[in-house]
Image: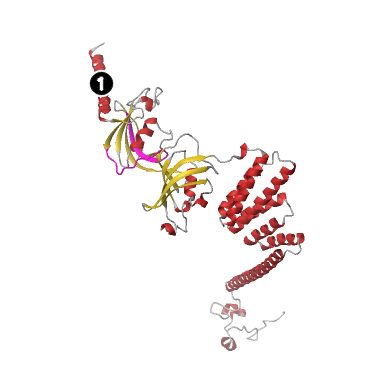
């Protein structure tokens, strides 16, 4: 080995030594935030953040970062790309050290995370930029975060900020009996705090807003979370006067799912049990309907259909009972839909009844009502006429036929007037076009000055005294010449 090689070897050793010293210094200055306190994730705050909040699991965080090896070699940087990096915290979409470290950062904070290989890319590394068993350093700036989006359309209308994670993996499904503690806030003022138990999906009956119910479908037992809920999943356009909540107001809730019991699941029941459960749902639906809680009634009648819709293992009396329950559920659904001005859905429910019972008077009558509400009296009248064929003394159907005929008459008169006006307009336009066309044609009775010119007179003669007084008249044979000879 020559002197140059010795010098190079010394330089490498010195670089490694200083890198090791820097790493040890970082371990001394930084805080160990790894769950098992094994120095796997060290955090050093470069610039403090604002407030007390940190992002919860499920939050969509936005950060800038620069990643380096221990020798200072940069392998990645969002700043170089001039584009912040976004990811869902706690979902395993980034290295483990990030899920741990970034969950501790406040808004505006800048920190250096030193990540041991087992919390980064491990033995395999991430070729070609990150070697195997590499300890990495990330300077991270927390820009902002949003709560986990639990809204059905992923439009941010229901955001969850987890305070205490739940246990296990199970979450409550529709009809599960949930036991919760909730605190509702508007403009940082508490407007309600209570414990309540109710079947999931029927929260309206217990005064639970839709946004809380939808969020609970993602809760685990024991979870406590803060929810930011937009007005469309809260008190909507009506507000809540008794809570001093105006229309179109967004609210916050802190909700703790203390426990829940699973609801009855259709697949676990035999045919007779399904029928009994369907009867319970039907009774609930009728109770809600009588209380004018049509949305809840709709949910219950849909449950009847869900439990009975698949025709399996129904024979004899069981099959008859099952079909009767389905007819009843669809008829009641149609009535609820008519009450809530969902006329297409009402029509579809009646069609389902008529598949099972083709001459069902109620289905024909309610379908006629739906068509009438959909401005189709010409179709509606046929359903009402069918009802009269089945029951001649049905006064309601006869009255609706009169209504339909009156509407059809008015509709025809309106169309006639519309078409008459349209034809008049077309005729006027055609007349104007014809007049314009005639105006553009040359007037053969006039010269350039509106009279006969010398060139039009036979032989190019001068105008006579009579022609001068009457410039629109051309005298033939005015000078006694033989102009008409041989004609």
Name the spot of residue 6 as percent of width and height, x first.
Answer: 24, 14
Quadrant for the N terminus, please.
top left
Name the spot of residue 65 as percent of width and height, x first.
Answer: 33, 36
Q: Is residue 309 visible?
A: no
Question: Pointer 1: what residue?
Answer: 17
Disc 1, SS: helix
Residue 430 falls in image quadrant: bottom right
Residue at horizontal 29 percent and vertical 38 percent from the top: 110
In magenta stretch: residue 48: yes
- Residue 121 as seen in the image, left or right of residue 343: left
Front-lying residue, 486 or 268: 268
Q: Is residue 379 above or below residue 81?
A: below
Residue at horizontal 72 percent and vertical 49 percent from the top: 356
- Residue 415 as seen in the image, left or right of residue 48: right
Front-lying residue, 348 or 208: 208
Q: Is residue 291 visible?
A: yes
Name the spot of residue 265 as percent of width and height, x first.
Answer: 59, 39
Residue at far top of view: 1
Quadrant for the C terminus, please.
bottom right
Few, some or many C-alpha atoms within 10 Å of disc 1 (few <14, some 14-19, many ≥20)?
few
Name the spot of residue 266 as percent of width and height, x first.
Answer: 61, 40
Q: How many marks?
A: 1
In magenta stretch: residue 292: no
Q: Which residue range is magenta in the image?
A: 47-68
Residue at horizontal 37 percent and vertical 23 percent from the top: 131
- Residue 259 as seen in the image, left or right of residue 427: left
Residue 379 falls in image quadrant: bottom right
Front-lying residue, 96 or 184: 184
């Amino acid at each position: 080995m020559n002197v140059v090689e010795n010098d190079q070897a010394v330089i490498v050793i010195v670089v490694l030594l200083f890198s090791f010293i820097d790493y040890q210094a970082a371990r001394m200055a930084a805080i160990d935030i790894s769950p098992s306190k094994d120095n796997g994730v060290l955090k050093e705050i470069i610039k403090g953040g604002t407030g007390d909040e940190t992002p919860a699991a499920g939050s969509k965080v936005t950060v800038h970062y620069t990643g380096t090896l221990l020798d200072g070699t940069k392998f990645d940087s969002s700043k170089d790309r001039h584009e912040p990096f976004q990811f869902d915290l706690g979902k395993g979409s980034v290295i483990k050290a990030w899920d741990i470290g970034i969950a501790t950062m406040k808004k505006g904070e800048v920190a250096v995370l030193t990540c041991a290989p087992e919390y980064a890319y491990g033995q395999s590394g991430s070729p070609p930029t990150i070697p195997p068993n590499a300890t990495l350093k990330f300077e991270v700036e927390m820009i902002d975060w949003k709560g986990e989006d639990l809204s059905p359309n992923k439009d941010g209308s229901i955001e969850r900020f987890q305070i205490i994670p739940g246990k296990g993996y199970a979450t409550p499904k529709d009809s599960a009996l949930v036991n919760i503690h909730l605190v509702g806030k508007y403009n940082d003022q508490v407007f309600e705090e209570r414990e309540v138990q109710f079947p999931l999906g029927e929260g309206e009956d217990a005064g639970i807003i839709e946004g809380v119910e939808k969020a609970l479908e993602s809760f685990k037992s024991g979870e406590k979370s803060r929810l930011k809920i937009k007005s469309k999943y809260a008190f909507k356009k009506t507000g809540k006067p008794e809570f001093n909540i105006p229309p179109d107001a967004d609210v916050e809730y802190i909700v703790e799912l203390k426990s829940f019991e699973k609801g009855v699941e259709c697949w676990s029941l035999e045919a007779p049990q399904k029928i009994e459960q369907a009867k319970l749902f039907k009774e609930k639906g009728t109770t809600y309907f009588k209380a004018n809680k049509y949305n809840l009634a709709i949910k219950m009648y849909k449950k009847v259909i869900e439990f009975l819709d698949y025709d399996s293992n129904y024979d004899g009396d069981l099959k008859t009972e099952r079909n009767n329950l389905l007819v009843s559920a669809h008829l009641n659904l149609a009535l609820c839909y008519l009450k809530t001005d969902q006329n297409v859905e009402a029509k579809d429910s009646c069609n389902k009844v008529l598949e099972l019972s083709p001459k069902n008077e109620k289905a024909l009558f309610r379908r006629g009502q739906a068509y009438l509400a959909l401005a189709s009296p010409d179709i509606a009248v046929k359903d009402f006429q069918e009802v009269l064929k089945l029951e001649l003394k049905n006064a309601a159907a006869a009255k609706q036929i009169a209504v339909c005929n009156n509407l059809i008459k008015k509709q025809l008169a309106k169309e006639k007037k519309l078409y008459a006006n349209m034809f008049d307009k077309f005729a006027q336009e055609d007349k104007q076009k014809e007049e314009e066309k005639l105006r553009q044609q040359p007037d053969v009775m006039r010269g350039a000055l509106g009279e006969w010119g010398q060139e039009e007179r036979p032989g190019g003669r001068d105008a006579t005294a009579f022609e001068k007084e009457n410039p629109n008249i051309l005298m033939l044979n005015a000078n006694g010449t033989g102009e008409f000879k041989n004609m």
